[in-house]
Image: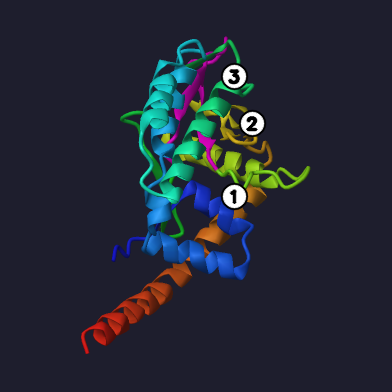
Amino acid sequence: MDTRKIISAHKLIDYAFASPQKRLAIIQNALQPPTFIMDTMYPDVERAAGHFLISNRNNSSHLDKLDEIYQTRDAHSDHHEQRLLNAMDAISHVKAMNWPLSDTWSLESAQGLPTDMTFCGVTIRIRPSVILKRRQSGFRYPFVGVLKTYFGKTNPLAVGNDGERGVLFGTLLHWFAEENLSFLGTADSSMCIAADVFAEKTYLGARRYKQRRKQLEALAQEIADRWEPISDRLQERDESRFSSAHQ
């Protein structure tokens, strides 16, 4: 079992608004990822979406190729079939979304750039979809931001009219850009975008972010404090099952 304290940005935001039972499950799944988390096709869709956005939404060939692959792939179970349907649905939403991207921005690949940030002993896996840059007269260095796609079909970033989940996500992205991409330019919260693909909605980092960053720190600290006790219980459970199976 990998005991490094690593959690995805998606799951950190989920954790912020989860019930105690769900919070426990999030940490357990981070320690021992179940099959239903590992076999998602969304990473491929996210990479293809990056190519689509960098082309200024003019070239959807990467998305189209994935869609064709998924349409012709044989499903070996009901679960696999649903995964394929979800991936194809995600592709259609990526192409249909109204992306809030300015003509004054340049979009670049995030390949080769930092993917994670660490605070309070927990590594948050960000993996931006694309990097955004904006040149402005009077400033020597560009303003920068990141865009991250979010695939949560049954768990949108807004509940009713409350988009705080999305804003918190955007604020995390702004913090990441500030901490990890300063060598590219100055992080701009209005260029840090969390994109809820299935809901076709986008959220920006908060301009006033101090309290939200404190909230993120408190969440990471809670995860760090609970990580080892939960890891120990999982290990004891697995050892007990192994022992019972060989008696």
- For the point 39% across and 26% down, the residue is 66
Mark 3 against mark 2, which lies toward the viewer?
Answer: 2
> At which x and y percent is residue 8?
45, 50
Amino acid at pointer 3: Leu
Residue 45 found in image quarter: top left
Range drawn in magenta: 126-151
Q: Which quadrant of the figure contains the C terminus?
A: bottom left
- Residue 78's place in the image compared with 190, above or below, is below
- Residue 226's place in the image compared with 198, above or below, is below
Residue furthest to the left in view is 246
Q: Which of marks 3 and 2 is nearer the N terminus?
A: 3
- Residue 216's place in the image compared with 59, above or below, is below
Image marks 2 and 1: residues in contact by CB distance under 8 Å: no
Residue furthest to the right in view is 161
**Residue 85 seen in the current view:** yes
| Separation of marks 2 and 1 at Cα, in angstroms | 26 Å
Residue linked to disc 2: 200
Residue linked to disc 3: 101
Amino acid at pointer 2: Glu
- Mark 3 neighbour class, 10 Å CA radius: few under 14, some 14 to 19, many 20 or more: some
Residue 228 magenta-highlighted: no
Residue linked to disc 1: 213
Mark 3 against mark 1, which lies toward the viewer?
Answer: 3
> At which x and y percent is residue 25?
50, 66
Residue furthest to the bottom in view is 247
| Separation of marks 3 and 2 at Cα, in angstroms | 14 Å
